[in-house]
Image (cartoon, rainbow, N blue to C red):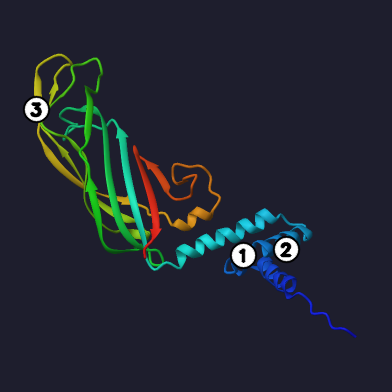
Amino acid sequence: MKYVQSNPLPVALFFLFTLALQSGSALAQTKMSAEEEAIYRNMVKSAGMDPETQLGAIKQNENAQRWTDAKVIHYHIVGVYEGKPNITSDPGKGSGFADVTERVEIDLDWKLSESMLVGTPHIQNSKSVVKNPQDAEPSCLPPVLKGEYEHYDLLGIKEGPGGALELQVQTIYPVVEVVQFCTGSRKPIPAARKTRPEELVVPSPVMFGMALPDSDNLRISPDKKSMSQRKAGWTWTFTPSVKK
Protein backbone atom coordinates (compact mmCIF):
# COMPACT_ATOMS: atom_id res chain seq x y z
CA MET A 1 0.00 0.00 0.00
CA LYS A 2 1.35 3.41 -0.94
CA TYR A 3 1.45 5.92 1.92
CA VAL A 4 0.35 9.42 0.98
CA GLN A 5 1.40 12.13 3.41
CA SER A 6 -1.47 14.38 4.35
CA ASN A 7 -1.20 18.16 4.31
CA PRO A 8 -0.96 19.26 7.97
CA LEU A 9 -1.99 22.86 7.16
CA PRO A 10 -5.80 22.41 7.28
CA VAL A 11 -5.52 20.39 10.48
CA ALA A 12 -3.36 23.02 12.14
CA LEU A 13 -5.66 25.79 10.98
CA PHE A 14 -8.74 23.94 12.19
CA PHE A 15 -7.08 23.67 15.60
CA LEU A 16 -6.38 27.42 15.56
CA PHE A 17 -9.93 28.07 14.35
CA THR A 18 -11.34 26.10 17.28
CA LEU A 19 -9.21 28.09 19.69
CA ALA A 20 -10.31 31.33 18.05
CA LEU A 21 -13.93 30.48 18.66
CA GLN A 22 -13.10 30.12 22.35
CA SER A 23 -10.79 33.11 22.66
CA GLY A 24 -9.99 35.99 20.30
CA SER A 25 -6.40 36.07 21.59
CA ALA A 26 -5.47 32.65 20.18
CA LEU A 27 -5.17 33.78 16.58
CA ALA A 28 -4.08 37.30 17.50
CA GLN A 29 -0.61 35.86 18.01
CA THR A 30 -0.66 33.87 14.74
CA LYS A 31 0.26 35.78 11.59
CA MET A 32 -1.49 34.06 8.65
CA SER A 33 -0.23 33.94 5.10
CA ALA A 34 -2.59 34.72 2.22
CA GLU A 35 -3.15 30.97 1.66
CA GLU A 36 -3.82 30.35 5.33
CA GLU A 37 -6.23 33.27 5.49
CA ALA A 38 -8.17 31.94 2.50
CA ILE A 39 -8.50 28.52 4.16
CA TYR A 40 -9.49 30.15 7.43
CA ARG A 41 -12.18 32.22 5.68
CA ASN A 42 -13.66 29.06 4.13
CA MET A 43 -13.70 27.27 7.49
CA VAL A 44 -15.38 30.19 9.22
CA LYS A 45 -17.95 30.46 6.45
CA SER A 46 -18.61 26.69 6.60
CA ALA A 47 -19.26 27.06 10.34
CA GLY A 48 -22.02 29.57 9.56
CA MET A 49 -20.06 32.61 10.73
CA ASP A 50 -19.00 35.85 9.04
CA PRO A 51 -15.31 35.70 8.03
CA GLU A 52 -14.95 39.49 8.08
CA THR A 53 -16.27 39.68 11.64
CA GLN A 54 -13.87 36.98 12.83
CA LEU A 55 -10.85 38.44 11.02
CA GLY A 56 -11.80 41.88 12.32
CA ALA A 57 -11.76 40.54 15.87
CA ILE A 58 -8.32 39.03 15.27
CA LYS A 59 -7.04 42.35 13.90
CA GLN A 60 -8.45 44.20 16.92
CA ASN A 61 -6.62 41.83 19.25
CA GLU A 62 -3.40 42.32 17.30
CA ASN A 63 -3.72 46.10 17.57
CA ALA A 64 -4.56 45.96 21.27
CA GLN A 65 -1.60 43.68 21.96
CA ARG A 66 0.73 46.11 20.19
CA TRP A 67 -0.14 48.78 22.76
CA THR A 68 -0.38 46.58 25.85
CA ASP A 69 3.01 45.00 25.08
CA ALA A 70 4.67 48.43 24.89
CA LYS A 71 6.59 49.47 27.99
CA VAL A 72 6.07 53.19 27.35
CA ILE A 73 3.70 55.08 25.04
CA HIS A 74 4.48 58.59 23.84
CA TYR A 75 1.56 61.00 23.50
CA HIS A 76 1.52 64.18 21.44
CA ILE A 77 -1.45 66.16 22.76
CA VAL A 78 -2.86 69.30 21.17
CA GLY A 79 -5.52 71.40 22.88
CA VAL A 80 -7.43 74.06 20.90
CA TYR A 81 -9.91 76.42 22.54
CA GLU A 82 -12.61 78.58 20.96
CA GLY A 83 -15.03 80.42 23.20
CA LYS A 84 -16.37 83.66 24.63
CA PRO A 85 -15.13 83.83 28.24
CA ASN A 86 -15.41 86.61 30.79
CA ILE A 87 -12.18 88.61 30.50
CA THR A 88 -12.41 90.54 33.79
CA SER A 89 -10.86 89.34 37.04
CA ASP A 90 -13.93 90.20 39.15
CA PRO A 91 -17.29 89.76 37.38
CA GLY A 92 -19.03 91.06 40.50
CA LYS A 93 -17.51 94.48 39.87
CA GLY A 94 -18.02 94.45 36.12
CA SER A 95 -17.97 91.96 33.31
CA GLY A 96 -16.73 91.90 29.76
CA PHE A 97 -16.55 89.17 27.17
CA ALA A 98 -14.53 88.51 24.04
CA ASP A 99 -14.02 85.93 21.31
CA VAL A 100 -10.92 84.02 22.42
CA THR A 101 -8.85 81.33 20.72
CA GLU A 102 -6.04 79.45 22.46
CA ARG A 103 -3.67 76.56 21.76
CA VAL A 104 -1.39 74.39 23.89
CA GLU A 105 0.78 71.39 22.96
CA ILE A 106 1.97 68.66 25.32
CA ASP A 107 4.44 65.83 24.77
CA LEU A 108 4.61 63.18 27.47
CA ASP A 109 5.51 59.55 28.06
CA TRP A 110 2.91 57.29 29.65
CA LYS A 111 3.13 53.82 31.17
CA LEU A 112 -0.17 52.30 30.10
CA SER A 113 -0.09 49.30 32.44
CA GLU A 114 0.07 51.56 35.51
CA SER A 115 -1.53 54.75 34.12
CA MET A 116 1.43 56.85 35.22
CA LEU A 117 3.76 59.48 33.83
CA VAL A 118 7.32 58.61 32.85
CA GLY A 119 9.75 61.52 33.02
CA THR A 120 8.82 65.19 32.71
CA PRO A 121 6.22 66.36 30.16
CA HIS A 122 7.13 69.08 27.67
CA ILE A 123 4.67 71.99 27.42
CA GLN A 124 4.35 74.59 24.68
CA ASN A 125 1.91 77.43 25.38
CA SER A 126 0.67 79.87 22.75
CA LYS A 127 -0.60 83.40 23.26
CA SER A 128 -4.34 83.91 23.43
CA VAL A 129 -5.97 85.69 20.51
CA VAL A 130 -8.65 88.11 21.76
CA LYS A 131 -11.19 89.71 19.43
CA ASN A 132 -14.49 91.58 19.62
CA PRO A 133 -14.62 92.61 23.31
CA GLN A 134 -18.15 93.46 24.38
CA ASP A 135 -20.24 94.24 27.42
CA ALA A 136 -22.62 91.67 28.89
CA GLU A 137 -25.27 93.73 27.11
CA PRO A 138 -24.12 93.88 23.47
CA SER A 139 -25.75 97.26 22.86
CA CYS A 140 -23.60 98.91 25.56
CA LEU A 141 -20.12 100.33 25.01
CA PRO A 142 -17.48 97.57 24.93
CA PRO A 143 -14.81 97.08 27.62
CA VAL A 144 -11.27 98.33 27.02
CA LEU A 145 -8.34 96.02 27.83
CA LYS A 146 -5.25 97.75 29.25
CA GLY A 147 -2.97 94.78 28.72
CA GLU A 148 -2.89 91.20 27.40
CA TYR A 149 -5.45 88.62 28.43
CA GLU A 150 -4.06 85.06 28.66
CA HIS A 151 -6.90 82.59 28.84
CA TYR A 152 -4.87 79.44 29.45
CA ASP A 153 -1.27 79.26 30.57
CA LEU A 154 -0.34 75.64 31.41
CA LEU A 155 2.18 75.73 34.26
CA GLY A 156 2.64 72.04 35.06
CA ILE A 157 1.32 68.49 34.81
CA LYS A 158 1.18 65.73 37.39
CA GLU A 159 -0.65 62.47 37.92
CA GLY A 160 -4.20 62.90 39.15
CA PRO A 161 -6.79 60.52 40.59
CA GLY A 162 -8.03 57.51 38.63
CA GLY A 163 -5.26 57.53 36.03
CA ALA A 164 -6.04 61.08 34.85
CA LEU A 165 -3.67 64.03 34.55
CA GLU A 166 -3.91 67.03 36.84
CA LEU A 167 -3.08 70.24 34.99
CA GLN A 168 -2.07 73.43 36.78
CA VAL A 169 -3.61 76.23 34.74
CA GLN A 170 -3.25 79.99 35.09
CA THR A 171 -5.44 82.72 33.60
CA ILE A 172 -3.96 86.22 33.42
CA TYR A 173 -6.39 89.14 33.51
CA PRO A 174 -5.24 92.65 32.57
CA VAL A 175 -6.82 95.83 33.87
CA VAL A 176 -10.13 96.10 32.04
CA GLU A 177 -12.14 99.31 31.91
CA VAL A 178 -15.88 98.61 31.84
CA VAL A 179 -18.58 101.16 31.16
CA GLN A 180 -21.15 102.09 33.83
CA PHE A 181 -24.83 102.41 33.01
CA CYS A 182 -24.21 101.23 29.45
CA THR A 183 -22.96 104.58 28.08
CA GLY A 184 -21.60 106.30 31.20
CA SER A 185 -18.09 106.71 32.54
CA ARG A 186 -15.66 103.81 32.75
CA LYS A 187 -14.23 102.15 35.84
CA PRO A 188 -11.20 99.86 35.98
CA ILE A 189 -11.40 96.22 37.07
CA PRO A 190 -7.97 95.34 38.52
CA ALA A 191 -5.52 92.92 36.96
CA ALA A 192 -5.09 89.45 38.48
CA ARG A 193 -3.53 86.02 38.02
CA LYS A 194 -5.70 83.04 38.95
CA THR A 195 -4.44 79.45 39.13
CA ARG A 196 -6.61 76.35 39.26
CA PRO A 197 -6.29 72.56 38.80
CA GLU A 198 -8.00 70.88 35.86
CA GLU A 199 -8.37 67.18 35.06
CA LEU A 200 -7.49 65.65 31.69
CA VAL A 201 -8.21 61.98 31.01
CA VAL A 202 -5.65 60.18 28.83
CA PRO A 203 -7.53 57.77 26.52
CA SER A 204 -5.97 54.35 25.99
CA PRO A 205 -4.86 53.56 22.41
CA VAL A 206 -6.54 50.18 22.86
CA MET A 207 -9.71 52.18 22.02
CA PHE A 208 -8.59 52.24 18.36
CA GLY A 209 -9.81 48.66 17.98
CA MET A 210 -13.24 49.24 19.49
CA ALA A 211 -16.51 50.17 17.84
CA LEU A 212 -17.43 53.38 19.67
CA PRO A 213 -20.43 55.69 19.21
CA ASP A 214 -19.71 59.18 17.92
CA SER A 215 -19.46 61.32 21.04
CA ASP A 216 -17.74 64.46 22.32
CA ASN A 217 -16.33 62.27 25.11
CA LEU A 218 -14.19 60.35 22.62
CA ARG A 219 -13.85 60.34 18.85
CA ILE A 220 -11.52 58.15 16.80
CA SER A 221 -9.99 59.68 13.65
CA PRO A 222 -10.79 57.89 10.33
CA ASP A 223 -7.15 56.76 9.99
CA LYS A 224 -7.23 55.45 13.59
CA LYS A 225 -4.07 57.33 14.52
CA SER A 226 -5.54 59.86 16.94
CA MET A 227 -8.37 60.34 19.43
CA SER A 228 -10.13 63.53 20.44
CA GLN A 229 -12.26 64.83 23.30
CA ARG A 230 -14.41 67.98 23.39
CA LYS A 231 -15.30 69.80 26.59
CA ALA A 232 -16.02 73.40 27.64
CA GLY A 233 -14.85 74.95 24.37
CA TRP A 234 -11.71 72.77 24.18
CA THR A 235 -10.86 70.09 21.64
CA TRP A 236 -8.08 67.82 22.89
CA THR A 237 -6.42 65.57 20.29
CA PHE A 238 -4.23 62.67 21.44
CA THR A 239 -1.78 60.99 19.04
CA PRO A 240 -0.04 58.02 20.68
CA SER A 241 2.97 56.09 19.44
CA VAL A 242 5.03 53.22 20.87
CA LYS A 243 8.23 54.62 22.29
CA LYS A 244 11.28 52.83 20.97
The one nearer the camera, 116 or 89, is: 116
Identify the secondary structure beneath mark 1.
loop
- 61 with respect to 156 (left or right): right
- As rendered, which of 62 and 219 lies closer to the eye? 62
**Residue 26: x %, y % from top left:** 61, 69
Whether 113 is drawn above or below 188: the answer is below
Quarter occupied by residue 109: bottom left
Residue sitting at 40 percent across and 45 percent down? 229
Looking at the figure, which quarter contains the N terminus? bottom right
State the separation of the CA atoms marked 3 and 2. 78 Å
Badge 3: residue crowd in 10 Å (few <14, some 14–19, many ≥20)? some
Q: Position of residue 38 (x, y in %)?
A: 70, 60
What secondary structure is marked by label 3? strand
Give whichever of 24, 89 is nearer the camera: 24
Which amino acid type corresponds to the residue marked 3 in the rendered image?
A: Pro
How dense is the environment of label 1, judged by Cα within 10 Å: few (below 14), some, or many (20 and up)?
Answer: some
Dividing the picture into quadrants, the one containing residue 183 is top left
| Residue identifier under label 2 | 39
> In which quadrant of the rendered image does the C terminus lie?
bottom left
Q: Nearer the viewer, mark 3 or mark 2?
A: 2
**Residue annotated with mark 3:** 188
Q: Along the polypeptide, which appears first: circle 1 or circle 3?
A: 1
The quadrant where residue 136 appears: top left
Name the residue rendered at 16%, 16% in the picture: 181
* Residue underneath mark 1: 24
